[in-house]
Image (spheres, rainbow, N blue to C red):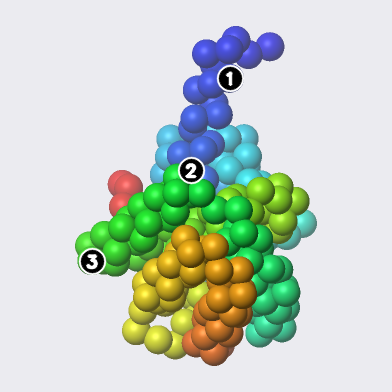
Amino acid sequence: MLHTDETSSTSARWITIYDELKSAILAHSVAPGTKLPEDELGEVFSVSRTIVRTALQALAHDRLVQLKPNRGAFVAKPTKKEAREIFGARALIEPRVAAMAAAVAKPSDIEVLRKHLEEEHRALYENRQGDAVLLSARFHESIAEIAGQSILTEFVRSLCSRSALIISLYSRRDSPFCESHAHAALVDAIAANNEAEASELMTRHLADLLSGIDVSDREPQGKRLAEVLRRS
């Protein structure tokens, strides 16, 4: 049996791998369809294959990685059908969630959202693409949390994680992120407790995101994972 400190160390190691791979995937560094060999990742991070496997299973739970029997783990490769279904689900859920958040938002909630906007702007200014994608997804999750609906929050979190990959990999625009003015307008509507406007803004925002998606076949790049993850 592992002692508490050993268990904590093991947990920290797989979480580090999870975080670095997730950021690399969402920052375009690892292409869809790229194989993620356990032995290679074990060498990159100087950990056992068991720890690597735990991180890959967590990424698979987020739908960012696909685990194929007898073949291994691969970066998820979303299809056009999946993209439409994911954004269709978001269009059904998030406008209602935005309205619910507007109905109950407190000044402290608005402060949290405005801090998110500042962090998004900073990430974009500093060209930290992976962080910008993650912060954008986190903004949408925060609105669901403000609404106070735990089940809907889980749905939104799962959908945002999957659509973040799609947006990051397949946007046909110069910037693959949620436009900052769209988020700012949403915060203003929620701050004003304007349920109808918050719902309408979210509907338009999601439609705009989907219109910028072009899911096309792309070949996995030839770089080694050690190069992609900037480890030697």
Which residue in the structure is indicated by mark 2? 17
For the residues labelled 3 and 2, the Cα–Cα distance comes to 26 Å
**Where in the figure is residue 221, as x and y percent of width and height?**
44, 72
Which residue in the structure is indicated by mark 1? 7
Q: Amino acid at mark 2?
A: Ile
Give SS at disc 3. helix
Circle 2 Cα neighbour tier, 10 Å, few/some/many (<14 / 14–19 / ≥20): many
Circle 3 Cα neighbour tier, 10 Å, few/some/many (<14 / 14–19 / ≥20): few
Q: Amino acid at mark 1?
A: Thr
**Where in the figure is residue 172, as x and y percent of width and height?**
44, 87
Badge number at residue 125: 3
**Where in the figure is residue 171, as x and y percent of width and height?**
47, 82
Give the vertical position of 87 relative to 187 (above or below): below
Give the vertical position of 186 relative to 49 (above or below): below
**Is any atom of residue 62 visible in this view?**
no
Q: Residue at x 51, y 75 (%)?
A: 167
